Image: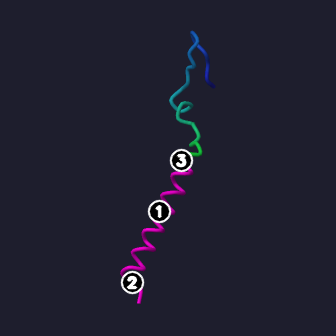
Amino acid sequence: MATREQNRIVETPTEARQGEPGPSVAALLAISTGLAILILAVVWFVFFRT
């Protein structure tokens, strides 16, 4: 558990790494996945449509 020493928070390395990814990480994943699907769809329509 984090402790305070001289107005500073002291954590072990394991405790310091236990942050949660914020909503920006989820948004980045969703946007990049959607963009990849869109690019693949455009490539498919341009080259493989019969």
Q: Amino acid at mark 3?
A: Val
Q: Amino acid at mark 2?
A: Phe
Q: Residues within 10 Å of mark 1 (few under 14, many from 20)?
A: few
Disc 1 to disc 3, C-alpha distance: 15 Å
Residue 20: mark in rendering: none
Q: Which residues are magenta?
A: 26-50
- Which numbered disc, 1 or 3, marks the residue closer to the eye? 1
Answer with mark 2 or mark 3, whichever residue precedes in sequence: 3
Q: Secondary structure at mark 1?
A: helix
Q: Quadrant of residue 3?
A: top right
The residue labelled by disc 2 is 48
Please report the residue visible at 53 percent of the width from the left and 26 percent of the height from the top.
12
Mark 2 and 3 residues: CB-CB less than 8 Å, in contact? Answer: no
Q: Secondary structure at mark 3?
A: helix
Answer with mark 2 or mark 1, whichever residue precedes in sequence: 1
The residue labelled by disc 3 is 25
* Left or right of 4 in this view: 36: left
Q: Is 5 or 45 nearer to us in this picture?
A: 45
The residue most toward the top is: 6
Q: Is residue 44 magenta?
A: yes
The residue labelled by disc 1 is 35
Please report the residue visible at 63 percent of the width from the left and 25 percent of the height from the top.
1
Q: In the figure, 37 relative to 20: above or below?
A: below
Q: In the figure, 1 relative to 44: above or below?
A: above
Q: Amino acid at mark 1?
A: Leu
Q: Secondary structure at mark 2?
A: loop
Disc 2 to disc 3, C-alpha distance: 34 Å
The residue most toward the bottom is: 50
Quarter of the figure with the C terminus: bottom left
Residue 11, x across and y down, in percent = 55, 24
